Image (cartoon, helix red, strand yellow):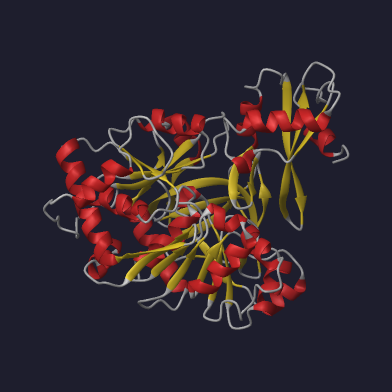
Amino acid sequence: MLLERLSNYAKTNAPCYVYEKRGEKIIYHYRQLARDSDRIAAYLTETLGEDKTPVVVYGHKSPFMLAAFIGCVKSGRCYVPVDEYTPATRVEQIINKVAPKCIFNLSERPLQGAVDMEGFSEIIEADAPEMDVDIQLEAEDLYYIIFTSGSTGEPKGVTIPYRCLDHFVNWALSLVDHREGLVFLNQAPFSFDLSVMDLYMSLGSGGCLHALDKDTQSDYKELYLSLSRSNAKVWVSTPSFVDLCLADRQFNQELMPKLEVFLFCGEILSPKTAKRLMDRFPRAKVINTYGPTESTVAVTSVKISPEMAAAGEVLPIGRPKPGTILAFLDEEGNFSDSGEILILGDTVSAGYFKEPEKTSQVFKEYDIDGKRLPGYHTGDLGYIKEGLYYCSGRTDNQIKLNGYRIELGDVEANLLRLPEVRACAVLPVYGSGKVQRLVAYVVTGEEVPDPLEKAAELREALAAFVNGYMIPQRFVFLDELPRTNNGKVDRKALSELKQ
């Protein structure tokens, strides 16, 4: 059990987290994590009593994020991670939906109604009694809620019970030669479910997480220095991030001599990327995984062979983990050899937070071999070939860009909030088998003398409502949007316009 694993390492002086920021290296130890999270749990228990409303944890890559997460869980409450780079409007939407009785602000940015770093420091430095680390959670108790893009313009919260995380971690650790002291690389922010893979694989094995913050990832010089100092053995990231690293020839086994495994999730891994990694890191394995937030990060895996990469074809997503069944549904909803991917099993989410209607649309139970199993309709299309599963696209307007899941309707709904936008449509542009960028087709109702200047204005205005990765890279201004015979926007006609 995950919490039992954490208890085993709680009193050691081994490092659990390394974070470099502005030239300063911060090392956080398991003993510190145990002490700080105990005091956070004591504070929440004392101040909130029996109220188990989820706790919002706002910040970026501070080690105290880990303490807040574990402290919430020890107190019997789930946590909601929100990255400090999230637009203020979106933060407000999440807070309004959760209605938390406590918010921890672990960033330098102000957040109304939150316990700031000064108050947080007082909590963890208080002379509070230690709590029992090995708290007993029931299988269906919520562990965390991660908010993802929603089609209506507002984010939706995916609820993950303890059973889901525990089953996931037990399986994920089987993908690597796990032993105490492994260093895992953390690229994704804690508000993105990919981070659950590296965070809990690390904590669940007595390992150390080496975190790369947003500024480091944006500065090539600092990025490669941090990678070389990391001593990482397990790399966890989106394929897009490793593509960025591969742009420089110094990204190779010599830079990271201890690297043993690349673990990818969040978007399509191209054969070209896999082959380049095998050439640069001949001693490391490349493992492709697949899974949505609604089924706890990932549910399939496959070790990519040199033959797979050299073939230049679409790479498989692998085979389902133990406890998971992947099925396909045709357009009528019947089981088929190909079609929409249906995930059934022990890591399927409990549904969307306070969204019963949306939950009922995609979360359903099925009788499989006499057992009642929870299922999630992914909206992904797939098929099986020679015993391996493949993902071949989407059934709706949801896409992945640089590993982030984006509802195109979410971007469109927020574009329409801008006064000068009368109509719009947002389309993805594909290349090498995955989404490369977003293009917004906009009708303003007036002449646009300088499209570049207007595009810059719209990007800046849109940044107040959506995350940066959701902002289209290109804007095309039209007098009107083409429409089909039934009055819908003709997206096919738009996609055929010069981009």
Residue lying at 81% horizontally and 26% vertically, measured from the top left? 484
Q: Tell me: residue 83, above or below residue 136.
A: above
| Residue ranking furthest to the right | 498
Percent position (x, y) of residue 480? 82, 21
Residue lying at 41% horizontally and 47% vertically, measured from the top left? 349
Q: Nearer the viewer, residue 414 or 340?
A: 414
Q: Is 410 left or right of 375, judged from the image as shown?
A: right
Q: Quadrant of the C terminus?
A: top right
Percent position (x, y) of residue 2? 30, 63
Percent position (x, y) of residue 50? 17, 37
Percent position (x, y) of residue 224? 60, 68
Residue lying at 51% horizontally and 73% vertically, measured from the top left? 229
Q: Is 10 left or right of 241, judged from the image as shown?
A: left
Q: Is 286 left or right of 475, judged from the image as shown?
A: left
Q: Is 439 left or right of 461, judged from the image as shown?
A: right
Q: Tell me: residue 300, above or below residue 489.
A: below
Residue 287 in view of the camera = yes
Place residue 217 in its image quadrant: bottom right
Q: Nearer the viewer, residue 83 or 383?
A: 83
Residue 50 in view of the camera = no
| Residue ranking furthest to the left | 129
| Residue ranking furthest to the front | 23
Q: Quadrant of the N terminus?
A: bottom left
Q: How many marks?
A: 0
Q: Nearer the viewer, residue 188 or 200?
A: 188
